[in-house]
Image: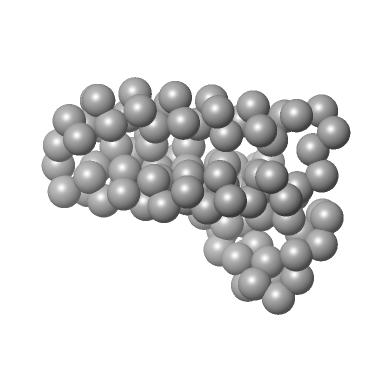
Amino acid sequence: MRRTGRVEEAYEAILPMYKVHHGKYTSLAMFWCAVDMMNLLMSRAVDGSDESVKALAEAEKIYMSLQRLAPKIYDESGSCQQTVINLGEALQSTRTRVGQ
């Protein structure tokens, strides 16, 4: 779903699965769906409007979850850890843009 652009749908679909099972592939799916959802939310945070601030707050919650999840994922290449670092930088840039 997420690869076809249905980011919100994919995120909502993986959440209940991940709540009951933290296997290798479920965790990876949760991670990448959360990454996509965070990117979507940051793209919606464009100014100081209430909607933008709310999107930014949701992106920050997802970022904190990703920081907790990433070390638990089988990540031989280090791509998950690097993605979390990149998202942190993007989040800081978004905060600046929104004025937070």
> As drawn, which residue projects farthest toward the bottom?
20
Quarter of the image for the C terminus: give it: top left
Quadrant for residue 67, please give it.
top right
Residue 14's spot in the image, x, y percent?
Answer: 65, 62
Residue 49's spot in the image, x, y percent?
Answer: 14, 42
Residue at 76%, 59% in the rendered image: 26
Residue at 22%, 45% in the rendered image: 53
Q: Is residue 40 visible from the viewing direction of this image? A: yes
- Relative to 68, does residue 98 appear above or below in the rendering? above
Residue 56's spot in the image, x, y percent?
Answer: 31, 43
Residue at 61%, 56% in the rendered image: 10
Quadrant for residue 42, please give it.
top left
Viewer-nearest residue: 85 or 38: 85
User: Colour scheme of this structure image?
Assistant: one colour
Residue at 82%, 28% in the rendered image: 77
Q: How many marks?
A: 0
Left or right: where 7 falls relative to 99: right
- Relative to 85, does residue 62 appear above or below in the rendering? below
- Relative to 99, does residue 55 appear above or below in the rendering? below
Q: Is residue 1 visible from the viewing direction of this image? A: no
Quadrant for residue 25, please give it.
bottom right
Left or right: where 74 falls relative to 15: right
Left or right: where 34 falls relative to 20: left
Residue 3's spot in the image, x, y percent?
Answer: 68, 41
